[in-house]
Image (tube, rainbow, N blue to C red):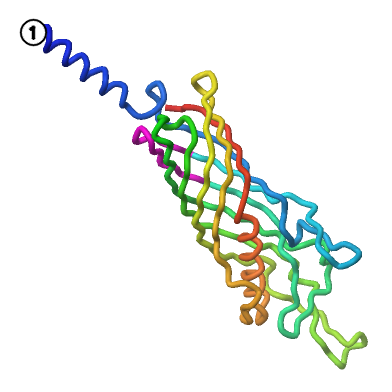
């Protein structure tokens, strides 16, 4: 009976040890990732001679990620994402932009998010196929040219008078919900390779919002929100990290 009890407790200890989350005792992963996809339209696409838009650019964003495996099939994720792209100029109310429209305003976006990865039953996190749900808050800034704008003026020799529009910088926030699926590999028991496809919905008011034509600020918020949505809606992603702790 004594020997049987020893064998039983050894079996329980072995099973318990096997169920400890993580990979060879490590649960934390620090990684860098890049997301990219051909641009749908906007400043990273250029008008052809027949007036149609031909995609010529790549939308991309960069991220720093921290993952912690808290269950054999689950990992909690914290993310920081950086993206930089362009926003087209559009006339507002009676004000026209007379500068170089081939040089778009610059949208800089910082995203902060949380997420959860769910791995297949046949695998132990952080290895193998997974699906991921996440939520992100985007803090955005549009830097634009405030000087080369004009309004109609019958007393001016040119029929227009130059005016200034705002300070040259506006800020706004957007919220997004994302879903992705991918696969992780572990190389040399240290390096984690992550690849997959990500979808992110960051709703915007759209061009149908008449309020966007009342001021430069509302116009860039609307156009910037649409640009961000198109930038984030679908991306391939690849990441590289290491088992840190």
Q: Nearer the viewer, residue 167 or 55?
A: 55
The residue depicted at 66 percent of the width and 62 percent of the height is 227
Residue 140 horizontal/vertical position (percent): 59, 60
Q: Is residue 64 left or right of residue 145?
A: left
Give the residue at mark 1: 2
**Would you call the spot at circle 1 few (<14 residues within 10 Å), some (14-19), or many (20 or more)?**
few
In the image, which residues are magenta? 66-79
Which residue is rendered at x = 72% and y = 54% of the image? 39
At numbered mark 1, what does the secondary structure look like: helix, strand or loop? helix
Q: In the rendered view, does 207 fall on the left or right side of 100?
A: left
Residue lying at the far bottom of the rendered structure: 154
Q: Position of residue 57 (x, y in %)?
A: 77, 51
Image position, residue 53 (x, y; %): 81, 62
| Magenta stretch: includes residue 75 | yes
On screen, residue 139 versus residue 124, left or right, reads: right
Q: In this rendered view, identify the residue nearer to me: 201 or 169.
A: 201
Estimate the x, y position of residue 83 in percent, counting from the top left. Answer: 63, 51
């Amino acid at each position: 009976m004594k020997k049987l009890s020893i064998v039983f407790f050894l079996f329980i200890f072995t099973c318990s040890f096997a169920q400890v989350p993580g990979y060879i005792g490590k649960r934390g992963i620090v990684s860098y990732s890049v997301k990219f996809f051909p641009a749908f339209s906007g400043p990273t696409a250029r008008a052809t001679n027949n007036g149609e838009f031909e995609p010529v650019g790549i939308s991309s964003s960069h991220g720093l990620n921290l993952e912690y495996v808290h269950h054999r099939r689950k990992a909690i994720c914290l993310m920081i994402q950086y993206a930089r792209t362009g926003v087209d100029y559009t006339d507002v109310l009676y004000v026209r932009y007379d500068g170089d429209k081939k040089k778009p305003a610059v949208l800089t976006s910082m995203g902060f998010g949380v997420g959860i990865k769910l791995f297949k039953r046949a695998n132990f996190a952080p290895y193998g196929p997974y699906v991921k749900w996440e939520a992100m808050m985007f803090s955005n800034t549009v830097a634009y040219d405030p000087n080369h704008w004009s309004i109609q003026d019958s007393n001016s020799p040119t029929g227009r008078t130059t005016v200034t529009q705002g300070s040259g910088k506006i800020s706004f926030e957007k919220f997004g919900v994302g879903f992705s699926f991918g696969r992780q590999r572990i190389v040399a028991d240290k390096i984690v390779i992550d690849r997959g496809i990500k979808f992110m919905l960051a709703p915007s008011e759209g061009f149908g919002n008449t309020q966007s034509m009342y001021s430069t600020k509302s116009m860039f918020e609307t156009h910037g929100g649409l640009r961000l949505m198109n930038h984030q809606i679908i991306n391939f992603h690849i990441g590289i990290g290491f088992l840190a702790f």
